[in-house]
Image: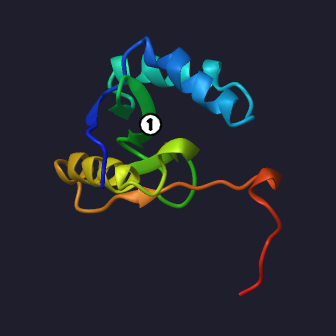
């Protein structure tokens, strides 16, 4: 069963709340990046959608109106930095965040892209 939660735009207080969730998972601080996201949201350069349940940030995703890198730069919107924190995974929250992001992108584009990046912390590469 999916716990009750709300989807909303990022607020300034979410910066520390999200950063604390990263630290709980033993990931590095993202305070500076999150501060930039909030500023970009304020100026219309990025949407940041937050999933909150029981007063805690469960996850977030960002949407750029236009990709900043790669083959779709300045052509199509890009979903970037999509996280559901471990304690909240497998509850449908990620699906709802993605749905909200896609619906927002659909309001101004027929195409949306997904920007991904890999780092050594994701584990060993697997061959298919």
Residue 120 seen in render: yes
The quadrant of the rendering that contains the N terminus is: bottom left
In the picture provided, is 17 more to the left or to the right than 51?
Answer: right
Identify the residue position indicated by label 1 in the image: 58
Residue 49 seen in render: no
Residue occupying the far left of the picture = 107
Q: Quadrant of residue 91 in the image? A: bottom left
The quadrant of the rendering that contains the C terminus is: bottom right
Q: How many marks?
A: 1
Please name the residue shown 19% across and 48% down the image: 108
Q: Is residue 50 above or below residue 88?
A: above
Nearest the viewer among 79 and 55 is: 55
Q: Quadrant of residue 59 in the image? A: top left
Please name the residue shown 39% across and 42% down the image: 63
Q: Is residue 104 above or below residue 70?
A: above
Give SS at disc 1. Answer: strand
Residue occupying the far top of the picture = 13
Nearest the viewer among 45 and 1 is: 1
In the picture provided, is 112 more to the left or to the right than 125?
Answer: left
Residue 88, horizontal then vertical, whole percent: 47, 45
Nearest the viewer among 22 and 99 is: 22
Q: Is residue 124 above or below residue 84?
A: below
Residue occupying the far bottom of the picture = 128
Please name the residue shown 45% across and 57% down the image: 90
Residue 125, horizontal then vertical, whole percent: 80, 71
Nearest the viewer among 118 and 53 is: 53
Residue 4, horizontal then vertical, whole percent: 26, 39
Please name the residue shown 68% across and 37% down the image: 25
Residue 85, horizontal then vertical, whole percent: 54, 42
In the picture provided, is 59 more to the left or to the right than 70?
Answer: left
Q: Local crowd at mark 1 within 10 Å, few (<14), some, or many (≥20)?
A: many
């Amino acid at each position: 069963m999916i716990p009750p939660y709300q989807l909303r735009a990022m607020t300034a207080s979410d910066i520390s709340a999200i950063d604390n969730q990263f630290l709980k998972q033993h990931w590095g601080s993202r305070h500076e990046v999150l501060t930039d996201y909030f500023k970009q949201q304020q100026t219309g350069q990025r949407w940041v959608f937050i999933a909150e349940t029981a007063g805690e940030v469960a996850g977030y995703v960002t949407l750029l109106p236009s990709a900043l890198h790669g083959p779709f730069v300045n052509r199509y919107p890009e979903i970037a930095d999509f996280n559901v924190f471990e304690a909240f995974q497998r509850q449908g929250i990620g699906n709802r965040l993605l749905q909200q992001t896609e619906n927002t992108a659909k309001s101004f584009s027929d195409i949306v892209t997904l920007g991904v990046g890999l780092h050594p912390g994701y584990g060993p590469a697997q061959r298919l």
